[in-house]
Image (cartoon, grey):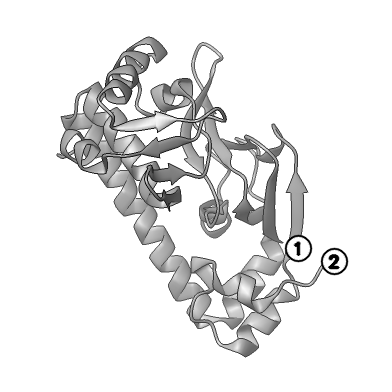
Amino acid sequence: MIATDHAELKQLTLFAGLPEDELEYISAFIRRATLGPDSLLVSALLPGEAVYWILDGSVKVQVMSEDGRELTLALLGPGDLVGELVLVAGRRNAASVVTREETSVLWLDRRDFIRCLDVSPALCRNLASELSERLRAADERLQAFATLDVTGRVALQILELAERYGSPVPGEGIRISIPVTQGEIGEMVAATRERVNQIMVRLRRDGVFSVDAKHHLIVSRPEVLAELGHF
């Protein structure tokens, strides 16, 4: 097992503010792995066995449609936590999580995760905060679906990705570190790929964003996305 540096853990929201002695205890249980593209991290309808933190790379959260198609509900990237809700609730997974590219993670199995929660009040508080944020984001997503048209939902989805995974590129805008395709955006906003293509072509033509050769979006006019995605 490769030791996990405390400074590395402190960069993750769940471990922010933990005392050094608690970090020392927790780091003894944490493992790391690097997975290739299309690796199954979490399997739908099976009990959760571990919690993961994404260090680099990205994953997609998927469900199976009634006609047997895999639909992407969300994209997750560096810093995100995966699998914690199932471990805490003790339920089966509702969705699968699959890597989209080579992805490095830290992870704890169920028993060790519960053990760490038992000894760290600060970790419990951070987890409660993380789960509250998930609920808030889910509420906003439901509101967006109820009130926005497809253009607004596409704009809001791109803006959210830019806020979560964006970094400034001088003279260009905000580059989203994880690649994203029109098909994935369409699935996340419940629209056809053809409709999303029409919207994104127009937004690109208007200089709202550009796309590089590796499907990374570079947002140049976030204020336009914010206006379109306002509800």
Residue 90 marker: none
Quadrant including the N terminus: bottom right
Relative depth, front residue between 92 and 102: 102
Count of numbered circles in the view:
2
Whole-angstrom CA distance, mark 1 to mark 2, is: 6 Å
Q: Position of residue 18 (x, y in %)?
A: 53, 82
Relative depth, front residue between 200 and 18: 200
Report helix, strand or loop for mark 1: strand
Q: Position of residue 106 (x, y in %)?
A: 68, 59
Q: Is residue 102 above or below residue 15?
A: above
Identify the residue shown where x is 36% and y is 50%: 163
Relative depth, front residue between 140 and 88: 140
Other-residue count near label 2 (Cα within 10 Å), few / some / many at <14 / 14–19 / ≥20: few
Amino acid beneath label 2: Met
- Left or right of residue 217: residue 39: right
Identify the residue shown where x is 27% and y is 45%: 139
Question: Where does label 2 land, which residue?
Answer: 1
Mark positioned earlier in the residue sequence (1 or 2):
2
From this viewpoint, which residue is outermost toward the right?
Answer: 1
Please identify the quarter of the rendering in which residue 158 is found.
Answer: top left
- Left or right of residue 138: residue 55: right
Report helix, strand or loop for mark 2: loop
Identify the residue shown where x is 49% and y is 67%: 13
Q: Position of residue 182 (x, y in %)?
A: 44, 22
Q: Are marks 1 and 2 in contact (CB under 8 Å)?
A: yes
Q: Is residue 99 above or below residue 30?
A: above
Q: Position of residue 230 (x, y in %)?
A: 16, 39
Question: Where does label 1 land, which residue?
Answer: 31
- Left or right of residue 67: residue 42: right
Q: Is residue 226 above or below residue 20?
A: above
Identify the residue shown where x is 56% and y is 87%: 19
Amino acid beneath label 1: Arg
